[in-house]
Amino acid sequence: MRIVMEIPEDAFRTPKTPQQVADEMRQAAAVFWVARGDVAPEAVNDIAGPSVPEKEGTLYELLMQGPNVGDDADFERPVEHGRELPEWDT
């Protein structure tokens, strides 16, 4: 199950990372659910354990997820032969 929460950053007296907030919320929820009897005490470690951050892909993988539209010529670098060299009198 995935739950998304939006919490203002200035709500905390000391700054916290999103990972810290997520870990603390999981721990608090596990304790609450065990106290209510919704969850077996053996399941607390599975719920309250530290989360494994999702692996972020590379920029290339992100770009490859985009639609395949347009012409390749739109993205080609124009051929540039440089500037003309001056002729010198020798």
Image (cartoon, rainbow, N blue to C red):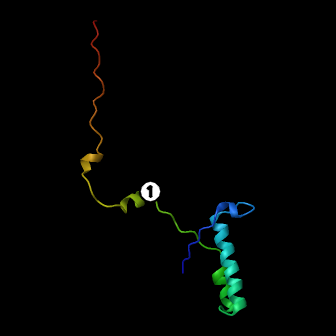
Q: Can see residue 49?
A: no
In the foreground, 37 or 41: 37
> Mark 1 belongs to which amino acid?
Leu
Residue 52 location (% of width, % of height): 59, 72
Residue 74 position within the rendered picture, expressed as x and y whole percent measured from the top left: 27, 46
Quarter of the picture containing the C terminus is top left
Where is residue 59 shown, x and y percent of the image?
44, 56
Residue lying furthest right: 13
At x 69%, y 93%, the residue is 37
Q: Which residue is mark 1?
A: 59
- Disc 1 secondary structure class: helix
- The answer to which image quadrant residue 4 occupies is bottom right
Q: Residue furthest top?
A: 90
Please state, as top left, top right, bottom left or bottom right, where the N terminus lies in the image.
Answer: bottom right
Identity of the residue drawn at 27% across and 57% down:
69
Seen in the image, is 4 located left or right of residue 78? right
For this view, does 88 lie left or right of residue 43?
Answer: left
Q: Quadrant of residue 86?
A: top left
